[in-house]
Image (spheres, rainbow, N blue to C red):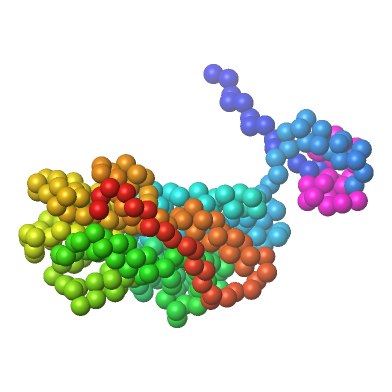
Amino acid sequence: MPPPASRQKRATIFDVAAEAGVSRGTVSRVLNGEPYVSARAREAIEAAIAKVGYVRNTAARNLATQSSGAIALIVHEPHSVFVDDPNIGAILLGINSSLSAADYQLVSLIIDTERDSQRVTGYLGGGFVDGAIIVSAREGDPISKAIADLRLPAVMIGRPDNQLQLPWVGIDNRGAAKQITQRLKATGRRRIGMIAAGLDRDSGRDRLAGFRDALGKSYDDTLVSRQSLYTHAAGVAGVTELLLADPHLDGVFAASDAVAVGALEALAAAGRRVPVDVGVVGFDDSAWARRARPGLSTIRQPAGDLGARAAELVLEQVRTGATTADGVLLPTEVVWRDSA
């Protein structure tokens, strides 16, 4: 049996220099985008790179520059939510667009368990990323505290714990929830319930607060179903609970579109017509809302823009070293369809 072929040696900067007939320093200046290299020498070097198959050693470059060229996206959600939630996908694409334009790599880190938190904390302290963007951070979240302790450039999507002094990008969840609940109430609904979710984070708490603001003295806490996650299953369970609390329920504000679609299906199973018997509104204007039947009235939030702006802010910190705890609010709007 013949011996295995040896792996071909990786081309080096010295190979490029020899092929191009220039010094190693001249090759290095071209690779680093520096001026003061003649057009003739630059052309020879580029041709030599193609001929010898030179691939830049990014690890060595990062070691020399003390930069990883990567930004972490940290998502605090179960794996199933990460895959199914179109908002997270839109945020991720917005982040990637801004990072790609700046020649940075996106590294996605999903936290589903305590072990994940410990693993990610160690990873962040290892110098593998230059900064981080945090989505769906929970109250008392250890990762956010670890980032603050490491003084790692970071931005939160959503309003952070003020003690951490981290910059953030978000929307006015409370004001938007109040706006759409008032719109639902104006259709003549009198027994309006809410399927509240994500109450361990700012978005969930603020949407419940906005619901209370809109109803004022008519707010009834027995008509709030508190669910853990923004999921379709939460909508099914929430409607079941609300109908038991009040069979005369005629309006539902669901804390997300996924929750709202679950609510629509549970109402149909219970023989309640939407919007004739019960008006339903959601939050996000995600793919869930556009596929719902009837079409879901909801709040449109700019998920992609949230991601893009967060990436811009973290890159600004990386470049300047300046940190601010200021927040940036992006606008939302009511999108009224046929469900209410």
Q: Is residue 31 magenta?
A: yes
Q: Is residue 240 above or below residue 142?
A: above
At 43% from the left edge and 60% from the top edge, which residue is drawn? 332
Query: Visible in this render: residue 160?
Result: yes
Residue 14, horizontal then vertical, whole percent: 81, 42
Q: Quadrant of the N terminus?
A: top right
Of the pair 183 and 19, the residue shown nearer to us: 183
Left or right? Give the position of 144 relative to 25. Answer: left
Q: In the depicted view, which residue is nearer to us: 24 or 7?
A: 24
10 inside magenta stretch = no
Q: Main secondary structure of the magenta part?
A: helix
Q: How many marks?
A: 0
Query: Where in the figure is residue 137, as x and y percent of width and height?
Result: 39, 66
| x, y percent for residue 267 | 15, 50
**In the rendered image, which quarter is residue 177 located in?**
bottom left
Q: Position of residue 130 (x, y in %)?
A: 59, 62
Q: Which residues are magenta?
A: 15-36
Lateral position of residue 216 relative to residue 76, left or right: left
Farthest top residue?
1
In percent of the image, x 32 and y 41: which residue is there? 291
Measured along the vertical axis of the image, is residue 118 above or below residue 258?
A: below
Q: Is residue 266 left or right of residue 321?
A: left
Q: Residue at x 59, y 74 (%)?
A: 323
Does residue 200 appear in this view?
A: no
The residue furthest bottom is 163
Q: Residue at x 90, y 40 (%)?
A: 39
- In the depicted structure, whether residue 241 falls above or below residue 264: below
> Does 264 sit above or below residue 220?
above
